[in-house]
Image: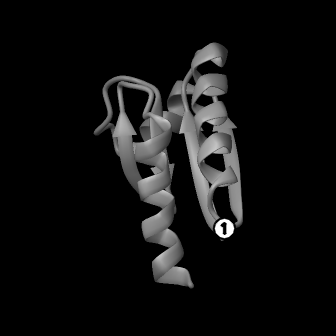
Amino acid sequence: MVKIHILSPALNIREKVFSNIRAAVKNLAIDVVVVRNEKQSHVNSCTGNKALTTPVIIVNGEMKSFGRIPDIDEITNWLDAKRVKIG
């Protein structure tokens, strides 16, 4: 199972990222849990203050993106790589 954190104080940004994740997962046979968190203190604690802008996307503890909304193809590539490792 892959755990994805979406960290952003802006609801509309979290929802857009979630929508892209949902579209990416549709094409893959993989179990994904998505955690959406809006608190800036949680962003700082999860990233060690390395991400200065949100949204921050963390996949299985690894920061994959920050400061932009990743597109569906990019998210699919992250998840496909995780699927190979756990499958």
Percent from the top left, x then y, of residue 30? 66, 67
Q: Position of residue 71 (x, y in %)?
A: 45, 34
Q: Is residue 30 left or right of residue 72?
A: right
In terms of depth relative to the viewer, which is nearer, 64 or 40? 64
**Towards the viewer: 71 or 69:** 71
Q: Is residue 68 above or below residue 65?
A: above
> Looking at the rendering, in which quadrant would you find the N terminus?
bottom right
Q: How is the image coloured?
A: one colour
Q: Quadrant of the C terminus?
A: bottom right
Q: Is residue 84 above or below residue 82?
A: below
What is the secondary structure assignment of the residue under circle 1? Answer: loop
Residue 61 vertical placement versus 51 (above, below): below
Q: Which residue is mark 1?
A: 30
Q: Does 47 appear above or below 27?
A: above
* Spot occupied by residue 59 in the image (x, y as percentages of width and height): 49, 56
Left or right relative to 1: residue 45: left
Q: Residue at x 59, y 35 (%)?
A: 20
Q: Residue furthest bottom?
A: 87
- Residue at the spot 67% in from the left edge and 68% down from the top edge: 29
Which residue is situated farthest in the front direction here? 27
Crowdedness of circle 1 by 10 Å Cα count: few (<14), some, many (20+)?
A: some
Q: Residue at x 48, y 70 (%)?
A: 82
Residue 61, horizontal then vertical, whole percent: 47, 60
- How many circles with numbers are drawn on the protein? 1
Q: Quadrant of residue 32?
A: bottom right
Task: Identify the residue shown where x is 49% and y is 52%.
Answer: 76
Q: Could you tell me the amino acid type at mark 1?
A: Ile
